[in-house]
Image: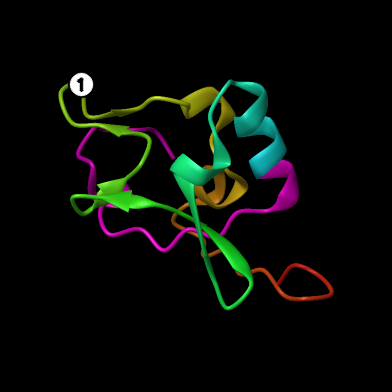
């Protein structure tokens, strides 16, 4: 899906993160304590002021677009992580 810079997919996200997503983002120099939150043992992207941590409000672009999480890459398909496998 081509990014139209509308910001809708970045608004109020409940995006789960895989271990690979986290490692990839950390390699970019981001601290996981800044960009993720843990709910019920599952890591999610943090929202700030209603938008994903990586959403740039001025450019309306993702600051890590080339390295974004799998769930963002497959959007609008919903990515759900399961304890033993991905569904």
**Residue 43 spot, x, y in % from top left:** 58, 60
What x and y, as percent, mark residue 64? 47, 26
**Helix, strand or loop at mark 1:** loop
**Is residue 84 rendered to the left or right of residue 56?**
right
Residue at 58% across / 21% down in the picture? Answer: 29
Q: Quadrant of residue 66?
A: top right
| Residue 8 within the segment the image draws in magenta | yes
Which percent across, then down, holds residue 10? 31, 47
Q: Residue furthest right?
A: 84
Quadrant for the C terminus, please. bottom right
Q: Which residue is mark 1?
A: 59
**Label 1: how many residues lie within 10 Å, few (<14), some (14-19) or many (20+)?**
few
Provide residue 30's location: percent of width, then percent of height: 53, 28
Image position of 55 (left or right of 18)? left
Q: Which residues are magenta?
A: 1-21
- The residue depicted at 64 percent of the width and 72 percent of the height is 41
The majority secondary structure of the magenta stretch comes to loop
Q: Nearer the viewer, residue 44 or 38?
A: 38
Q: Quadrant of the N terminus?
A: top left
């Amino acid at each position: 899906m081509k990014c139209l810079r509308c910001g809708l997919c970045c608004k109020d996200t409940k995006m789960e993160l895989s271990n690979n997503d986290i490692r990839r983002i950390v390699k970019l120099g981001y601290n996981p304590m800044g960009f993720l939150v843990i709910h019920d043992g599952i890591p999610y992207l943090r929202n700030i002021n209603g938008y994903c941590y990586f959403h740039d409000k001025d450019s309306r672009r993702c600051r890590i677009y080339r390295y974004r999480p799998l769930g963002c890459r497959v959007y609008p398909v919903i990515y759900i992580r399961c304890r033993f496998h991905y569904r």
